[in-house]
Amino acid sequence: MSAVLHLPKAVEESILQSGGASRRSFLKGSGALVITLSVATLPGNGALAAEPAAAGPYPDPDFLQLDTWIVIHPDNTATFYVGKTDGGQGTGTAYRQMMCDELDIAYDSTRLIMGCTDITPDQGGSGGSDGVERDGWAMRRVSAEARRVLLELGGQHLGVPVEMLAVSNATITSKSGASKKVTYAELIGGKRFNVAVTGRNVDNIAVKAPVKPVGELRVVGQPMKRYDIPGKVDGSLKWAVDMKLPGMVHARNVRPPLAGATLQRIDESSVADVPGFLRVISRGNYVAVICQREEQAIRAARQLKVDWTPPASAPFPASAELFKYMRSAAATVTSEPQVQGDPATALAGAAQVIEAEYEVPFQGHTAIGPAHALADPSDGQMTIYSNDMKAYGLRNGVARFLDMPREKVRVVYMDGPQVYGRTAADDAGFEAAFLAHEMGRPVRMQWMRDEETAWDTKGPPYVFKLRGGLDSQGKLVALEYDACAADHNHLGYNEPDTVLIAQLMGRRPARPSRGSAEAPSVMYAIPHRRTTTRIVGLPMIWETPLRTGNLRDPNGPQVTFAFESFIDEMAAAAKADPVQFRLDMLSAASEDAVFRKARSLAVVTAAAKAFKWDARPSPRPRTAARGNLLTGRGIAYTYRGSTIAATIAEVQVNRETGHVWVKRLACAHDCGLAINPEGLRHTVECGMLHALSRALYEEVQFDGGKVTSVDWASSPTLRHADTPQAIDIVLVNGDPNPARADLAPYGAGETSHKPVIAAVANAIYDATGVRLRRPPFRSDRVLAALRAAKV
Amino acid sequence: MSIVKLNVNGAAHEVDVDPSTPLLYVLRNDLDLHGPRFGCGLGQCSVCTVIIDGVAVRSCITPVSAVRGQVTTLEGLAKDGKLHPLQQAWIDEQAAQCGYCQNGQIMTAKALLDRNPNPSDAEIRTAMDGALCRCMTYYRVQAAIKRVVRGTTAAGAAK
């Protein structure tokens, strides 16, 4: 076994330069010089191994101290520390860009450390696409404040009033003569700022310095290449999954074969012949095996003989019966109806009334890399090396789970497979910590593929019923929207009584969480509306593989699919062009504080232009000489928070096979100020394709006792062959005053994900005249619908 | 356990493991080569791909004792401190999101270009189809491969 520590280079540098034990003593230090090393002289991993798992305690870095956020090194470079994580959208690069601009330092002279709970301020990790939108403000403010303090120091040093100073690339010069200059490093390199800021929480930090107006930003707006990609393509970056420690052993879980099964007996002799076998650890219905080597743990988990008692009644209906079950299930929560105008009267007087129901199945996170973590219990502390997007929550949750003081627990964030909400309930992190605590030595937990696909957290399924009324001019005057989600007991964030290991051990909160069923996010003017939502639960709400959790925009794709499909149905009934039908409703809307009306109009218009939309009603008129490949186009529009997106899909439907190929995608996207337009485009693109996978393939299937989608054959995903031929992304700034000095950046991780299922359904309708009201649009289902409609 | 001999990235190794151990775990845990990663253990996703004598192989289902020939991992692509044109193209195209699967994308692409330096778009799609990505970087991965085919990476490296 290797006895070498592996840390991400950035974390390693941080620990060596000013981090780890020395980073913590730096933060509470007296302003003395700290030992720093330039990047070029960093020792290798071996030197770090000599300074193992820096002993705690691990107090919270004080977010009110500049030193917590920014260190200026003697070589005139800087390290930024932020309480965020990057799930692969390049947000780390964006954070650096924002901080460089405010500090006035070259991008290449900086580093960024994220999400290590003992050395970075608690900004909650990631979630909700709010990193740039919300947390970026704290980063910008402290950077601006650091610049202000440095200018003051520079003025004193040079004997020049601050207003006579200029600063560029971490060097301060006198406007009256460039010979008078001093670098940031000469002023403070390796030393503490010892400057406090104010604010009641990390999101409301107040500083004396103003942040720069948009027009003065130089690094923001540039298509900087992501700093993490080179190490990801040459194999040098160390991920959470690569982390190793001396004395580490390997764990695998043994899950109940049926949801709700009760553990009767474990026959440990059944694994006695497995080389390297160390222990079976079990509590309640939680079972894990520990072995010296990884392949031994895999074998032991498969070989261990465990007797389980099946549950007395079915934990859930089979997936084929899910929607029928949901329609008849008693609601756990029913919202107050939201009523605007008089929808009943308006519908009664409508020239045309359309009614439709839609369904969306459970869809999983199905991360490409199953859950994993390494936990080290050395010195009575607990360190978890993890890709948890919410590293701080994992720390707090594990401390409570193990009944340890928070100060003795830390999480070191490292890169991992895309999460999109999966690690908000970081099952593997808790399991590794529990097993390490039991074993008294470092334990690496790794889930297997069937376990991840079956037992990860799921996006909630929905059934919808919509009714709409058109007046004699084809205007949508009344709309009733009813949504039902099976989201009872939606998982919380790293709670010690709701993560899977806790559920299996029988640790539970007093009551299950509420869950949510949502209304659509659109700006349409529809004079008479009624919106009702309710939540239902499955028969079994604990210890179930059908655990709902946050999956990339947790309700948006489902809700937008139903709503924007229905808007399309109304447009078709009105014999109106689907784009114009939407523009008319947007034009009639009233404006709001973030100009969502103006920006929605700009976005829908830009999408149509980029796609070269041919205005006409759907479906496409049938021609006599059509072949087997039917083409069509569909649009869907939505917003998420303050970010607006409209997506147009062009599909090619094979009449003989039912196969749908989305040949072209166009997206117009307005998230205000683009910090890194290149990274933004890629995130928008991949958000769309992830939703395309949900539109065409993804569906969790289960029988009455277990999930039967367990691998990439039974749980298919989008593949290379499905990739559109062309993807056009237009970054729109639809602000009525686009050059405003305070233009804000809004989140971009989820909005483009939201409208795609609807756009594809609308395009399939345009191509074939057949309305599909339930994703995924797998070939067999499409073919059956085409045959039924005699297309 | 028994001694198994391997040649990986030009270096000879001996490891003392159960001969049925998948190559993946020997590479990762004994040789500290982390390019290939665990994704499914079933040979379905390509995240664990290595190249053995020019052929893309799923190391998660290949017993270490069955390995004959030269194994190349992601770490073995760069030569003399210079990235392989595919790696450079990945940077130029910013092909990764999380990057977890990119070993499988790059190694599958390498095996493709080694046997067919000038694939058509359709051939790229077909050859790459088994390399799964849950961030859905497919469009950019294909663009990066086409960059190499055209010989237009930033480093100016031809194939």
Image (cartoon, rainbow, N blue to C red):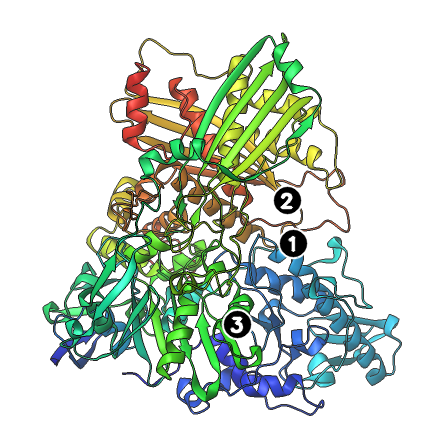
Q: Amino acid at mark 1?
A: Glu
Q: Is A655 placed left or right of A732 in the picture?
A: left
Q: Nearer the viewer, mark 1 or mark 2?
A: 2
Res B132 seen here: yes
Q: CA distance from mark 3 to mark 2?
A: 33 Å
What chain does mark 1 sit on?
Answer: A
Residue plotted at (74% across, 73% down): A146
Q: Is the same chain shared between marks 1 and 3?
A: yes
Q: Amino acid at mark 2?
A: Gly
Q: A338 or A219, which is in the foreground?
A: A338
Q: Quadrant of residue A151?
A: bottom right
- Where is residue A248 drawn, in percent x and y? 33, 81
Q: Compared with residue A230, is residue A21 higher up or lower down, i.e. above or below?
A: below
The disc at residue A259 is none
Q: B82 or A778, which is in the foreground?
A: A778
Q: Compared with residue A228, is residue A515 higher up or lower down, i.e. above or below?
A: above
Mark 1–mark 2 CB contact (< 8 Å): yes
- Where is residue A427 drawn, in percent x and y? 42, 63
Residue plotted at (43% across, 86% down): A378
Q: Is the same chain shared between marks 1 and 2?
A: yes
What chain does mark 2 sit on?
Answer: A
What chain does mark 3 sit on?
Answer: A
Residue plotted at (57% across, 82% down): A58
Q: Earlier in the sequence, mark 1 or mark 2?
A: 1
Question: Element under label 3?
Answer: helix
Crowdedness near tag 2: few (<14), some (14–19) or many (≥20) residues, C-alpha within 10 Å? some
- Where is residue A163 drawn, in percent x and y? 87, 70
Q: Compared with residue A212, is residue A621 higher up or lower down, i.e. above or below?
A: above
- Residue highlighted by disc 1: A133
- Residue highlighted by disc 2: A641
